[in-house]
Image: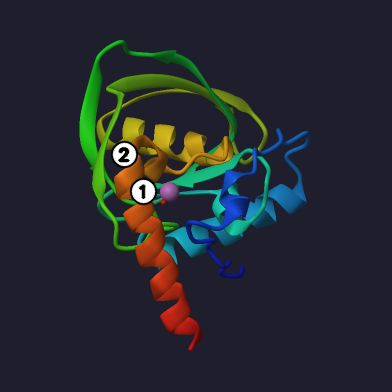
Amino acid sequence: MAKLEILRYPNPRLHTVAKPVAQVDARIRALIDDMLETMYDANGIGLAATQVDVHERVVVIDVSEERNEPLVLINPEIVWASPSRVKGEEGCLSVPGIYDGVERAESVRVRAQDREGAAREIAAEGLLAVCIQHEMDHLMGKVFVEYLSPLKRTRIKTKLLKAERELAR
Ligand code: GNR
Ligand code: NI
């Protein structure tokens, strides 16, 4: 296993659209293991392959308190989203230190393959539903700050670029 580097906003590679995984093989399972290690190490509740600069439809999630319930979603598709929407505070490992409200479907049904390549359907609500939608946005090249106002987004960009420059010095 290996810890991977997480791309930070406004890195343009975060806007790459991921391709479907054709075959769930040893290469994909190694990627999943590395992504889980990276997510747990960073104390995140989810991680999309896009964030580690791999542009394939792979997501790992763990919203459990004990951090021992990994969920792997390969080629996830939302097959149903509730018309009811809820606004919740979101953060992102690619946008460190920034938290803001985003409106999402309250519950979703997702079809995806697991780490064996078997098809599954998952019903999600609460934090899991939020996280699934946040991760699937990453696979489409979308970062949560794109739901915020242009003014907020500009401020976030400036703040993160400044932090990056100070780290490089
Ligand atoms: O760790 C994370 N926490 C979180 C909190 C509220 C809504 C979404 C998230 S996902 C985030 C990890 C991450 O950046 N995944 O892409
Ligand atoms: Ni994120």
Picture coordinates of residue 14 (x, y %)? 57, 50
Any mark on residue 86, and which?
A: none
Picture coordinates of residue 131 (x, y %)? 37, 39
Q: CA distance from mark 1 to mark 2?
A: 6 Å
**Residue at 35%, 65% in the rendered image:** 159
Picture coordinates of residue 69 (x, y %)? 39, 47
The answer as to whether callout 2 falls within 8 Å of ligand 1 is no
In this rendering, the answer to whether 107 lies above or below 48 is: above
In which quadrant will I find the N terminus? bottom right
The reply to whether residue 34 is visible in this rendering is yes
Q: Amino acid at mark 2?
A: Ser
Q: Which residue is mark 2?
A: 149
Q: Which residue is mark 1?
A: 153
**Residue 141 vs residue 168, the one in the foreground:** 168
**Residue 121 vs residue 12, the one in the foreground:** 12
Q: Residues within 10 Å of mark 2 (few under 14, many from 20)?
A: few
Coloured how? rainbow
**Residue at 64%, 44% in the rendered image:** 16
Q: Secondary structure at mark 2?
A: loop
Q: Secondary structure at mark 1?
A: helix
**Residue at 62%, 41% in the rendered image:** 115
In this rendering, the answer to whether 70 lies above or below 101 is: below
Residue 108, by quadrant, is top left
The reply to whether residue 42 is visible in this rendering is no
In the displayed structure image, the side of residue 144 where residue 20 appears, left or right: right
Q: Amino acid at mark 1?
A: Arg
In the displayed structure image, the side of residue 134 where residue 55 appears, left or right: right
Asked whether the beta carbons under mark 1 and mark 2 sit within 8 Å of each other, the answer is yes
